[in-house]
């Protein structure tokens, strides 16, 4: 008698045996190991010890074998790129949320000013400095970091697009607003203020940014 073909269990039948789905457990463990390596990379980079930033030292700090480190990251550049992605929720996502949340231009601009007026944490500040140093010496890091900054600057462009849309709705004068030029101008000012603060200058960035954004917005009415 011919062997009967095996019929796969019906997932809707409660009496059917459980079917394993998803990735194996080793995958979850691998993600944990990867996260530990990235955390160790952040610690070394934020410590300002670029000469000690090697895959071997990252592995030792995270308690992972050097071979396992290379299993997840081919070289130290891969580790730096992972850190670039890892810090995105700490500086880009909040700005994107402040700009995209509902409200008129003035309300969104105020959210942006309040967010940027908060002091940057020491670790994040040191990480940005370290990443800039690596960008000067590694083309892959430079391209990755520049892509992040384009996304960051895009938030200010989006903010002024809101202003252009509002002007269109009221009097069809949105064409006088150049979101790209205005957004890039504010982004450059924010960078300048951050550089001044990093050198210890006592600059109250909140009022400066608020005045700049309001002045640029008012100037578009002329």
Image (spheres, rainbow, N blue to C red):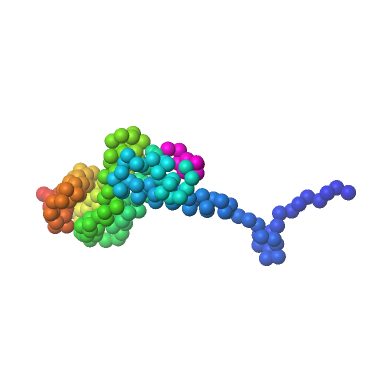
Could you tell me which residue is drawn at 68 percent across and 65 percent down? Answer: 14
**In magenta segment, residue 64:** no
Q: Nearer the viewer, residue 69 or 139?
A: 69
List the single residue furthest toward the right.
Answer: 1
Residue 91 is situated, as x and y percent measured from the top left of the image, at 30, 52
Q: In the picture, residue 185 is in which quadrant?
A: top left
List the single residue furthest toward the left.
Answer: 222
Could you tell me which residue is drawn at 27 percent across and 55 percent down? Answer: 121
Residue 44 is situated, as x and y percent measured from the top left of the image, at 34, 47
Could you tell me which residue is drawn at 17 percent across and 57 percent down? Answer: 206
Residue 13 is situated, as x and y percent measured from the top left of the image, at 68, 63
Instruction: Look at the image and give the residue range highlighted in magenta.
Output: 67-75
Could you tell me which residue is drawn at 32 percent across and 54 percent down? Answer: 90
Q: Is most of the magenta stretch helix, strand or loop?
A: helix
Q: Nearer the viewer, residue 117 or 180?
A: 117
List the single residue furthest toward the bottom.
Answer: 14
**In magenta segment, residue 72:** yes
Q: Nearer the viewer, residue 210 or 191?
A: 191
Residue 11 is situated, as x and y percent measured from the top left of the image, at 66, 59
Q: Say whether residue 21 is visible.
A: yes
Q: Is residue 144 above or below residue 166?
A: above
Q: In the picture, residue 211 is in which quadrant?
A: bottom left
The total number of labels drawn is 0
Q: Say whether residue 186 is visible.
A: no
Q: Nearer the viewer, residue 15 or 196?
A: 196
């Amino acid at each position: 008698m011919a062997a009967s073909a095996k019929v796969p269990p019906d997932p809707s039948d409660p009496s059917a045996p459980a079917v394993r789905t998803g990735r194996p457990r080793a995958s979850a463990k691998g993600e944990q190991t990867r996260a530990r390596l990235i955390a160790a990379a952040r610690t070394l980079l934020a410590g300002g010890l670029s000469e000690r930033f090697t895959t071997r030292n990252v592995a030792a700090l995270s308690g992972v074998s050097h071979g396992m480190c290379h299993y997840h990251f081919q070289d130290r550049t891969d580790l730096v790129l992972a850190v670039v992605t890892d810090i995105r929720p700490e500086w880009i996502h909040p700005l994107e949320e402040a700009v995209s949340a509902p409200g008129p231009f003035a309300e969104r601009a105020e959210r942006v000013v309040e967010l940027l007026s908060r002091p940057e944490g020491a670790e994040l500040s040191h990480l940005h400095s370290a990443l800039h140093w690596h960008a000067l010496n590694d083309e892959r890091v430079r391209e990755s970091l520049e892509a992040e900054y384009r996304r960051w600057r895009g938030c200010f462009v989006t903010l002024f697009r809101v202003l252009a849309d509002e002007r269109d709705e009221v009097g069809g004068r949105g064409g006088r607003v150049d979101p790209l030029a205005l957004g890039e101008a504010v982004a450059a000012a924010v960078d300048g203020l951050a550089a001044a603060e990093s050198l210890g200058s006592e600059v109250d960035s909140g009022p400066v940014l608020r005045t700049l954004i309001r002045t640029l917005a008012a100037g578009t009415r002329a």
